[in-house]
Every structure is written in C-alpha cells, then in structure tokens.
C-alpha cells in the first residue's frame, strides 16, 4: 500500500513539473497557471515541487520501489547456479562484428530440481570456445522465472 501511495505522489508531482514545463515552452501566461499554487510567483512553488519529486525519485531508486512487478525487481531475487551447455546456436545477428548466440542450458540449482533455460548474448570467438556443449558455466536466474538466465561472473559461483 505504501508503495502505491509513494508512486501516486511521485506521478502527481511529475505531472505538475510537466505542466510547468509545457506552459513555459508554449509561452502561456504563467500568472494564470493550470496548477493553482503555481499562479502568481511560480518559481517558489516549482522549486518545492521539483525538490520533492527529485527526493522521491532517489528514494524509489534506492529502495527499489520503482521497479515493476510483484516481486520488486530481478536483481534482488536472483540466485547463482551452474549450468551445463546443451546447445549453442547463432541467431544471425552481429553487433560490431561480434555474433549473437542462443545458448540452451540445463541449470542445476543447489536447492531444487534441474531445469532447462536459455540465454541470448554476444560472444566473441575467444569466449564462444568456452561455451560449447558439455561446458559448465555459472549463471544467474530468478527462481520465479526460470526460463531465462544470464551469465554470472566466475567468482559468483559458490
């Protein structure tokens, strides 16, 4: 409930800032603003609104309340496990001469059943030699969304 109240206040303050910017860009007489407390001396009101909006934005990003979904955010719920490469296929896309691959893995978490997942990523020719069928690679996964994983750093595999 608190999360929704903070979001609504943040959106309302953002709307006030957007109205103020719109009125300034379209040369509307700001002494007769659409927002009543910005009429007369708009600089004082918009400073308070802007500061409050900025502080709430920092709060939302620091605490993680701005992330969508019921779980809060992916970074807070990920786990690390080892995955065995089952298959690797090129997608046909290259970015800066680095090919993109779809890698299918069988992930073996410590506290659950094995599952099959995939990751899509750019692998240079030197990296792709270590990501061949049968190779074990550390991956990050979200327990509630096991179909997709991402590569983890070597030091993350505990």
Image (spheres, helix red, strand yellow):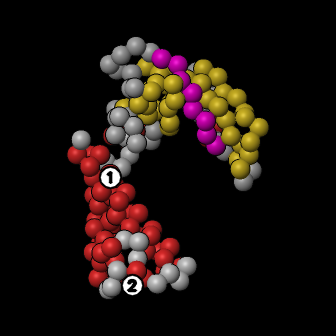
Helix, strand or loop status at disc 1? helix
Query: Quadrant of the rendered structure where residue 124 is?
Result: top right
Numbered-mark total: 2
Q: Residue at x 33, y 85 (%)?
A: 40
Q: Quadrant of the C terminus?
A: top left
Q: Residue at x 61, y 29 (%)?
A: 103
- State the image coordinates of residue 32 (x, y, percent, origin top left): 40, 80
In primary-sequence order, the first of circles 1 and 2 is 1
Image height of 154 relative to 111, above or below: below
Q: Quadrant of the N terminus?
A: top left
Question: Closer to the camera, 1 or 158?
Answer: 1
Neighbor class of circle 2 (other Cα within 10 Å; few <14, some 14-19, many 20+) is few
CA–CA distance between discs 1 and 2?
27 Å
- State the image coordinates of residue 60 (x, y, percent, origin top left): 31, 54
Q: Which residues are magenta?
A: 115-122
Question: Closer to the camera, 120 or 97?
Answer: 120
Query: Quadrant of the rendered structure where residue 16 is?
Result: bottom left
Magenta stretch encompasses residue 88: no
- State the image coordinates of residue 73 (x, y, percent, origin top left): 37, 41
Please state if 149 lies on the left or on the right of 86 as rendered.
Answer: left
Query: Quadrant of the rendered structure where residue 131 is?
Result: top right
Please state if 25 lies on the left or on the right of 133 as rendered.
Answer: left
Residue to which mark 1 is pinned: 8
Please state if 154 lies on the left or on the right of 85 as rendered.
Answer: left
Mark drawn on residue 31: 2
């Amino acid at each position: 409930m608190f999360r929704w109240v903070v979001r609504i206040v943040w959106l309302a303050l953002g709307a006030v800032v957007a109205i103020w910017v719109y009125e300034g860009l379209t040369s509307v007489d700001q002494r007769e603003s659409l927002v009543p407390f910005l009429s007369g001396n708009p600089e004082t009101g918009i400073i308070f609104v802007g500061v409050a909006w900025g502080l709430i934005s920092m709060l939302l990003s620091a605490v993680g309340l701005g992330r969508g979904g019921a779980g809060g955010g992916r970074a807070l719920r990920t786990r690390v496990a080892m995955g065995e490469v089952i298959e690797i296929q090129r997608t046909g896309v290259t970015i800066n001469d680095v090919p993109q691959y779809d890698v299918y893995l069988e992930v073996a978490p410590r506290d659950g059943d094995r599952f099959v997942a995939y990751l899509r990523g750019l692998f240079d020719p030197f990296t792709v030699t270590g990501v061949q069928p049968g190779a074990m690679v550390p991956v990050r996964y979200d327990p509630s969304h096991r179909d997709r994983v991402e590569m983890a750093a070597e030091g993350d595999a505990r």
